[in-house]
Amino acid sequence: MRPATPRLRAVLLTAAGAGLVWGPAAPAAAASDTWKVPSEASITVRGHGFGHGHGMSQHGAEGAARRGLSAAQILDFYYPGTTAGKRGGRVSVLISADTTDDLVVRSRDGLRVRDLASGDTTRLPKKIGGRTPALWRLRQNHRDRTRVSWRTSAGGQGSWTKWRDLKGNGELSAGNAPVTLVTPSGDRAYRGRLRALPPSAGSKARDTVNKLRLDDYLRGVVPLEIPASWSPAAVRAQAVAARSYAVFERRTPRAAHYQLCDTSSCQVYGGVRAEQPGSDAAVRATAKQVRLADGQAAFTQFSSSSGGWTAAGSRPYLRAKADPYDDWAGNAHHDWSVTLTDARLESAFPAVGDLRSIKVLDRDGNGQWGGRVLSVRLAGTRGTVTVSGDALRFGLGLKSPWVTFRVRSR
C-alpha cells in the first residue's frame, strides 16, 4: 500500500543555471507557492489525478479490485457512511445527437406509435398500398398535433407521406427491442421508447427523449464510464455508482420533459452501440443495487483518477481522504505533466496581458504540494486575474486542479 504523501514545510528547489523552480510540497499559504514568469517562458505543469476527485476514483476502483476488494468494499471505501439499497423504474434521457425538430426512425418489425394525449398505441404497417416504408417520422403539424409520416427511401431522398395525425405528442417503440434513430451525425439504436417532445409549452421545436428501464439505460452508460474489460469488481462498483447517480438525478429532473442528459454533464450514455458483454454482466450482477444516504439514493459522484487523495464534495459521504488504490501501473493519470508556453496562459486569461507571475493563493491541504489548487492569482502587464482552481483547469485544459508549476525562459 502506498502511504499518503504528508504535508511538508515549504521547500524551494532551484536548479542552478537552469533558471527553473519546481513548486513546493507545502501548504497553500507558503510564500514559495509563487513563480515569476519571464517575457518568453516555458511553463511545465505537474499534476495528480483526472477529474474533480469527488467520490469514487474509477482507476482507484480497478486498483482496489486488483488488491482483492469486492464491489461492496470499493463502494464502502469511496462512499463512507452510505448503505446498500434497491431501486428500479425508468429514466428519461435527452438524446443530444438529434438536433432536428422531428424524430425519424428506421422501419423494423414490431414498431409501434403511441399517442401520449390519448394513450392509444398502434402497430405501424409493414406495407401501405403495396409500398414498404423505410422510415417513419414524428413531427409537429400546423394544428399543434403530431403528424406521423413515412417514406420508402432510406437514403435521404423522396417525399414524406402522411399516415395519420395524433392528438398530442408521440412516441415510437418496438417493445424493448432496439429502435434505430436517424440523426444528423448518423444512426443510433436505443432500447425503450423514443419520444418527440417540445422543450416548453407552445414551442414548435422538438427534442428527442429516450424513456427506458433504468438497468437498460445503465447498459449504455457503464462501458462509456469505465472499461468493460476491467476487473469484475470494479465494473460492478461502477454499475452501482452509475445507478445511484441516475436515481439521485431522477428526483430533480434536468427539465420538465426529461430527467437526464446523455453527456458528461450527467453520465455519458450511448444507447445500444455502447453495450459490452463485460458491463452487461456487471449490470445484471448488481440488478437494482444502489447506495443510500438517509433513505435516498446517494449523490455518487465519480471521476477517472483521484491522484492519491479524493476531494471533499457537497455531501458528508464525499470526503477528502487518502486513496491508496489509485496508484497502479495502468493509471497514467495518477502522475502527469504538460508543458505550455506563457502565451497559452495569456490567451486563456487575456486580461493579464503579458504574464509576469503565478501565485497559488489557497489549496485544500490534502497531499503533495498542499493539495488541489482552490484559487490562483495571475499577474501581468495589463492587470491581475484571480481564478479558482477549476477555472484554471478548464481554461488550460488540465486534467485536474491538483498542480504545481515549473517556469523557465525559452
Image (tube, rainbow, N blue to C red):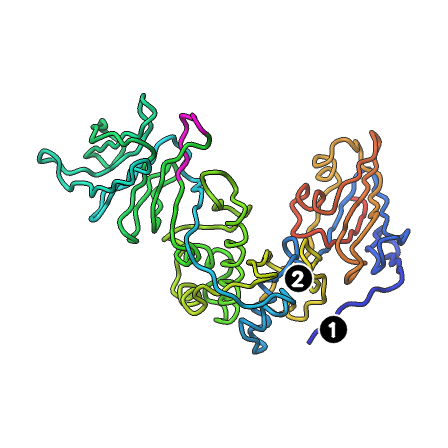
Residue numbers of the magenta segment: 201-208
Residue 205 painted magenta = yes
Figure quadrant of the C terminus? top right
- Numbered badge on residue 3: 1
The circle on residue 205 is none
Left or right: 167 as drawn, with respect to 109: right
At 70% across and 39% down in the image, what residue appears?
344
* Residue shown at 45% from the left, 39% from the top: 257
Q: Earlier in the sequence, mark 1 or mark 2?
A: 1
Q: Residues within 10 Å of mark 2 (few under 14, many from 20)?
A: many
Residue occupying image coordinates x 52% and y 42%: 254
Please give the residue where the numbered disc 2 appears in the rendered image.
317
Q: Using the image as rendered, state which of residue 253 and residue 128 is in the foreground.
A: 253
Does residue 222 appear to the left or right of 145 in the view shown? right
Q: CA distance from mark 1 to mark 2?
A: 22 Å
Q: Nearer the viewer, residue 295 or 223?
A: 295
- Image location of residue 221, percent across then percent down: 46, 55
Numbered disc 1: secondary structure: loop
